Amino acid sequence: MSTGPNASRHSRAGRRRRLLAAQCAFVATAAVLVPGCSTSSDLPRVAVIGDSITALAQPDISTELEGSFDVGFVFRISVRMDQMLDLLAADLRDNGPTKAAVINLGTNDAIAGGDSAQALATFDQLMKTVGPVQCVVLTTIGPFADDRGRSDVGASLNRRMDHLVAADPRRFKLVDWSRLLGSLDPESRGFVLQPDRIHETEAGARWIAVSDKTALDTCGTDEQPSMIRVPGP
């Protein structure tokens, strides 16, 4: 996602979001990390970890989760999973107890292609890094990333996520972005997915944010979040 737009471009949806972004005092660019941007220390902390997909959805995620969670963002543009391990470990170490982690990584690994075994090994390291976290929300990788990488990295990572959810549904929750995209006809898909077939539109960002909140609300139960309907035009 080397051409992915930055988060500041999408801080457009209202004065409240612009104020939140200003309070965080960071702007997501191709080389800037956005750690520990929190809403209230009195609320349970959630770390939101990702790449440019998370950067685009950050204003909507902030709006959706504020009031219920103390939200910290850790994302960078064009980042692979291995490049986030140390950053995530530092965030969890330096920002106190974290109740949940929302993870949307692996798309750039799929775009890079190559051997899925290496990506799976890195994903396992990622899961070890979030070992102390009580609830982990995993976001599946859109199917078109594998088309770019000419490999099955994304599909392999999605299967690993499915296995984790099946094995421990109380701890692992799934936001199934891949399933959503696969279920839509081309016209409907274009409402939530940009023409590059990787990044979400504004409607897609809202879908991700609402799905993240729905998943977090099921933490500690055997219930899995239901698929959120795509918002209308």
Image (spheres, helix red, strand yellow):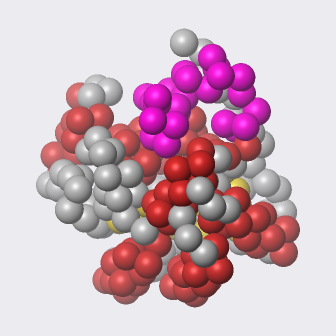
The region drawn magenta spans 180-205
Q: Residue at x 64, y 47 (%)?
A: 143
Tell me if 166 is positioned left or right of 126 in this view.
right
Residue 48 at x, y = what percent?
45, 61
Q: Residue at x 54, y 12 (%)?
A: 233
Is 220 rendered above or below residue 194?
below
Magenta-colored stretch includes residue 201: yes
Magenta-colored stretch includes residue 185: yes
As drawn, the residue found furthest toward the top would be 233
As drawn, the residue found furthest toward the front would be 150
Q: Count the marks: how many?
A: 0
Is 115 rendered above or below residue 52?
below
Tell me if 88 is positioned left or right of 226 in this view.
left
Is 75 rendered above or below residue 16?
below
Residue 120 at x, y = what percent?
63, 77
Q: Residue at x 17, y 56 (%)?
A: 26
Tell me if 149 is positioned left or right of 74 in this view.
right
